[in-house]
Image (tube, rainbow, N blue to C red):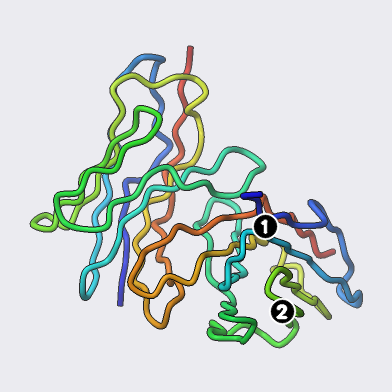
Amino acid sequence: DTEVTQTPKHLVMGMTNKKSLKCEQHMGHRAMYWYKQKAKKPPELMFVYSYEKLSINESVPSRFSPECPNSSLLNLHLHALQPEDSALYLCASSQEGGLSVEKLFFGSGTQLSVL
Amino acid sequence: GDSVTQMEGPVTLSEEAFLTINCTYTATGYPSLFWYVQYPGEGLQLLLKATKADDKGSNKGFEATYRKETTSFHLEKGSVQVSDSAVYFCALSDDPGGYQKVTFGTGTKLQVIP
């Protein structure tokens, strides 16, 4: 299994809603990532988990709350979002490599619309 | 900090034309370089990579050579197909602490017409 699976594929939510995005991989990768991609822009790193611990938070607003319940799962909890948070949210994983360079495996993303 | 600059698109080519998408980078140290491709409605897929100077990455007819002296990693393909229409991202990565911090360029949209 060489896939990163993200659910849901599409999500529409109001500014007062609470929702969660889910990401799953079964490749034994120990680093998992959330990226945000606005239309016609490159992906921007939000969070990195390494060995289930948060390693990087790129100054993301607290209305985005990541969670890594185990080495295969990564969630992104959403609360009180703004319309400008509408974007494609991409999950990725990579093998912990140390000195070896491994590629990122990306999921196909969740297209989020905040009304 | 690290940065990647790639040519603005869209690039429109006829089928079987030669493709070049320019990419230059700035980085401290010795990064690895990548090209990712994103088809409409999908996530990113690694197209090719090079990990050190003068390495050539290749895949599906696409090639790019890591040029340290010009800090470049231009993407080329000899004969494009309609199915190559997508957005192409040049990227670099260092590997601090055992995870990948990837810096992406702004993307170049390629449109191939029959």
Q: Position of residue A29 (x, y in %)?
A: 58, 66
Report whether mark 2 lies on the same chain as mark 1: yes
In the displayed image of the protein, which residue is found farthest to the left?
B69
Q: Residue at x 29, y 39 (%)?
A: B75
Q: Position of residue A25 (x, y in %)?
A: 68, 60
Q: Nearer the viewer, residue B64 or A114?
A: B64
Is A97 drawn above or below residue B9 in the view shown? below
Q: Number of callouts in the render? A: 2
Q: Position of residue B71 (x, y in %)?
A: 17, 57
Q: Which mark is residue A88?
A: 1
- Residue that carries the numbered disc 2 in the rendered image: A68
Is B43 drawn above or below residue B9 in the view shown? below
* First reached walking from the N terminus: tag 2 or tag 1: 2
Query: Residue A18 is drawn in which quadrant?
Result: bottom right
Q: Secondary structure at mark 1?
A: strand
Indicate left or right for B68 with A28 as reference.
Answer: left
Query: Residue B103 is drawn in which quadrant?
Result: bottom left
Q: CA distance from mark 2 to mark 1?
A: 20 Å
Q: Residue at x 48, y 43 (%)?
A: B37
- Tag nearer the camera, 2 or 1: 2
Indicate left or right for B44 with B98 as reference.
Answer: right
Q: Nearer the viewer, residue A88 or A97?
A: A97
Q: Chain of mark 2?
A: A
Q: Residue at x 86, y 74 (%)?
A: A15
Q: Residue at x 44, y 19 (%)?
A: B81
Indicate left or right for A34 with B51 as reference.
Answer: right
The kind of residue tagged 1 is: Leu
The kind of residue tagged 2 is: Cys
Using a 10 Å C-alpha cutoff, classify the residue at mark 1 as few (fewer than 14 neighbours), some (14 to 19) or many (20 or more).
many
